[in-house]
Image (cartoon, grey):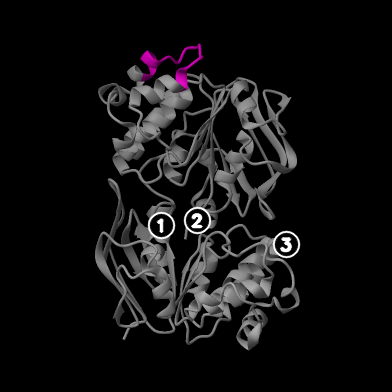
C-alpha cells in the first residue's frame, strides 16, 4: 500500500489550469522531491494533498484511504503533517507553547486551547529533535528565520505524521542556516514518508530517492535523481533551447540609469539579498537570471522601494534613491511590471490603461500603446481579468509604458505563458529596445532572456555569482547556476 497516491488531479483557478491531470505514487518511507520552475503547480499540489484546496477533478489517497476534499484538519489527524513557505507560528507565544498547540490540534483537543498548556514529553522530544530545547522559553517572534523553520518542523513532527510535506524549507536561509536545516531534514525518521518542494535543486536531488518534475501543471518526468539530472526534457525546462543569442545586440551608448552597491534586503529577520551590485545603462536590456527562490523578485522589489534596504544604496540617474518610498521612485521614472500581472477587478482593458496614463505626458500615449499592442485594441472593452494570461501580460507592460518611465523593471513576464506567448513577450521586449527603452528583466526562461538581453547577471542565494554578455554564458555556466 502506498503512503500517498494522487490520481489524475486537476485544479483550476478560473480559466487557469494549475494542475492538469497529475498522478503520482509515493511508497512508505520514501523521500520524494517535487521540482519545477515557478508556476509549475508544486505548492498547489501540496495544498490539494493536504486538503487546503479541493481538486477540480481527480482523487487523493492517504495510506489507502481516500481523502479527496476532506478538510485539512481531518487530513492532518489521519497522519499528514505539513510545513509552509512562510512561518505560521504564533509570534506572541513561547516556542514550546506553539508546539504544544500543534500537539493538541493533532488530537482534536480544540476545546482545550483556552486552558493552560504544559510542555509534556512529546513537546520536549520534538524540540530536542530539531535543536530548539534551549530556546523553548523564547517568544516565537524573536527567533531567527532559521529557528522559525526549525519550529515549524517541530510543530509538524509533534503530530507524529506518517507523511510529511515540506514546502520550500530552505527558502531565504543563510548558508549556515541552510546547512543546519538541511541536515535536520536528512536526519528525519526513515520510516516517515517525506515529500519536499525545494528550489535549491542540488539539495533536492541529494535528499530524494525519486524526483517528480512538474511543468505547466503536468508531470513531465519522474525517476531517480541522476536520471532526472540527465533528462534532456528537464534540462530544456530549466535552461531552454531553440532561441539562439543575437550577437548583434550591443550595449547602448547612453549613460548610467540604475546602479546599486552592496544592496542587502529581505523580509523581517530573513535576509534574502547580500551585497548585490549591478548597473543598467541607458537603452540596455539587462537580464537578471537565477533559479526560483534565489532573490530576483526581492531585488526588483528593493530597487522599486517596495522593500526597505538593510544595507547598501540604490542610485537612479546619479541620485541616491535607496531611502525613497516607492511612489517617489515612480515619479522619478521607475516603473514595475509585477509578477502575476495583477489585473484590477471590474475594470476593462481600456479603463486599466486610461488609469495608468492619467496625468502623464510623453511619447507613450493610449493610442500609441494600442497601436503597439493590436490585440489589446481588439479587447479594449473586455474585462481585464477575462483576458488570457498572455493578454494580461500585455496589459501589465502597457500600463508601465504609459507612465513614460526611464526604467522598466519586469518581474517574470513569461511566467505561466504558452511557448507562443513567450515568443510574443520576447518580441515586445525587442520592440522596447528598438524604441530606446531601458529594461531590467528578471526571468526564469533562460534562453528567452539571453536572446533579448545586452548583459546578464546571475543570482544564487541572494548574491551575484556571474555577469557578462549573453554570448559569454557558456553551457557550463548555465548548467552550473541554472540547470538541474
Tag shown at residue 235: 1
Q: What crowding class fits label 1: few (fewer than 14 Cα within 10 Å), some (14-19), or many (20 or more)?
A: some
Locate residue 420 relative to residue 296 in the image: left or right. left
Looking at the image, residue 245 lies above or below residue 14: above
Label 3 – label 2 distance at C-alpha: 39 Å
Image position, residue 441 (x, y; %): 51, 36
In the image, 120 versus 457, the foreground residue is 120
Q: Is 357 contained in the magenta span?
A: yes
Q: Which of the two labelled residues, at mark 1 and mark 2, occupies the earlier sequence position?
A: 1
Kindly identify which residue carries mark 2. Answer: 479
The boundaries of the magenta stretch are 356-369
Kindly identify which residue carries mark 3. Answer: 142
Image position, residue 10 (x, y; %): 27, 60
Asked if disc 3 and disc 2 are in contact, CB closer than 8 Å, the reply is no
Label 1 – label 2 distance at C-alpha: 8 Å
> What secondary structure is found at the residue carrying circle 2?
helix
In the image, 81 versus 412, the foreground residue is 81
Q: What crowding class fits label 2: few (fewer than 14 Cα within 10 Å), some (14-19), or many (20 or more)?
A: some
Amino acid at each position: 500500500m502506498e503512503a500517498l497516491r494522487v490520481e489524475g488531479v486537476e485544479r483550476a483557478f478560473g480559466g487557469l489550469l494549475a494542475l492538469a491531470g497529475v498522478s503520482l505514487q509515493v511508497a512508505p518511507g520514501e523521500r520524494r522531491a517535487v521540482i519545477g520552475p515557478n508556476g509549475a503547480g508544486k505548492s498547489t499540489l501540496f495544498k490539494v494533498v493536504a486538503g487546503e484546496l479541493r481538486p477540480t477533478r481527480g482523487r487523493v489517497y492517504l495510506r489507502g484511504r481516500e481523502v479527496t476534499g476532506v478538510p485539512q484538519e481531518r487530513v492532518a489527524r489521519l497522519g499528514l503533517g505539513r510545513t509552509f513557505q512562510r512561518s505560521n507560528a504564533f509570534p506572541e507565544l513561547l516556542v514550546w507553547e506553539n508546539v504544544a498547540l500543534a500537539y493538541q490540534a493533532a488530537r482534536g483537543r480544540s476545546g482545550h486551547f483556552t486552558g493552560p498548556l504544559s510542555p509534556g514529553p512529546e513537546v520536549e522530544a520534538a524540540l530536542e529533535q530539531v535543536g530548539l530545547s534551549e530556546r523553548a522559553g523564547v517568544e516565537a517572534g524573536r527567533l531567527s528565520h532559521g529557528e522559525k523553520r526549525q519550529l515549524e518542523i517541530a510543530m509538524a513532527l509533534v503530530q507524529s505524521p506518517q507523511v510529511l510535506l515540506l514546502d520550500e524549507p530552505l527558502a531565504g536561509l543563510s548558508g549556515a542556516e541552510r546547512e543546519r536545516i538541511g541536515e535536520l531534514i536528512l536526519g528525519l525518521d526513515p520510516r516517515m514518508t517525506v515529500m519536499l518542494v525545494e528550489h535549491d535543486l542540488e539539495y533536492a536531488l541529494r535528499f530524494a530517492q525519486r524526483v517528480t518534475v512538474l511543468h505547466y501543471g503536468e508531470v513531465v518526468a519522474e525517476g531517480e535523481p541522476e536520471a532526472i539530472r540527465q533528462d534532456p526534457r528537464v534540462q530544456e525546462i530549466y535552461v531552454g533551447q531553440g532561441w539562439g543569442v543575437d550577437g548583434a545586440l550591443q550595449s547602448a551608448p547612453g549613460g548610467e540609469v540604475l546602479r546599486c552597491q552592496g544592496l542587502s534586503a529581505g523580509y523581517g529577520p530573513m535576509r534574502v539579498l547580500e551585497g548585490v551590485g549591478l548597473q543598467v545603462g541607458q537603452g540596455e536590456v539587462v537580464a537578471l537570471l537565477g533559479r526560483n527562490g534565489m532573490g530576483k523578485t526581492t531585488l526588483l522589489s528593493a530597487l522599486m522601494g517596495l522593500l526597505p534596504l538593510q544595507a547598501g544604496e540604490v542610485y537612479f540617474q546619479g541620485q541616491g534613491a535607496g531611502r525613497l518610498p516607492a511612489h517617489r521612485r515612480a515619479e522619478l521614472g521607475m516603473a514595475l511590471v509585477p509578477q502575476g500581472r495583477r489585473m484590477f477587478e471590474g475594470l476593462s482593458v481600456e479603463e486599466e490603461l486610461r488609469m495608468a496614463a492619467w496625468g502623464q505626458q510623453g511619447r507613450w500615449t493610449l493610442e500609441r500603446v494600442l497601436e503597439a499592442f493590436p490585440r489589446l485594441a481588439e479587447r479594449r472593452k473586455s474585462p481585464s481579468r477575462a483576458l488570457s494570461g498572455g493578454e494580461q501580460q500585455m496589459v501589465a507592460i502597457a500600463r508601465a509604458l504609459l507612465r513614460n518611465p526611464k526604467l522598466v523593471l519586469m518581474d517574470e513576464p513569461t511566467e505561466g505563458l504558452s511557448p507562443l506567448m513567450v515568443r510574443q513577450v520576447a518580441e515586445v521586449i525587442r520592440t522596447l529596445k528598438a524604441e530606446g527603452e531601458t529594461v531590467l528583466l528578471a526571468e526564469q526562461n533562460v534562453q528567452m532572456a539571453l536572446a533579448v538581453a545586452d548583459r546578464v547577471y546571475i543570482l544564487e542565494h541572494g548574491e551575484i555569482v556571474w555577469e557578462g554578455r549573453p554570448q559569454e554564458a557558456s553551457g557550463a555556466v548555465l548548467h552550473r547556476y541554472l540547470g538541474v
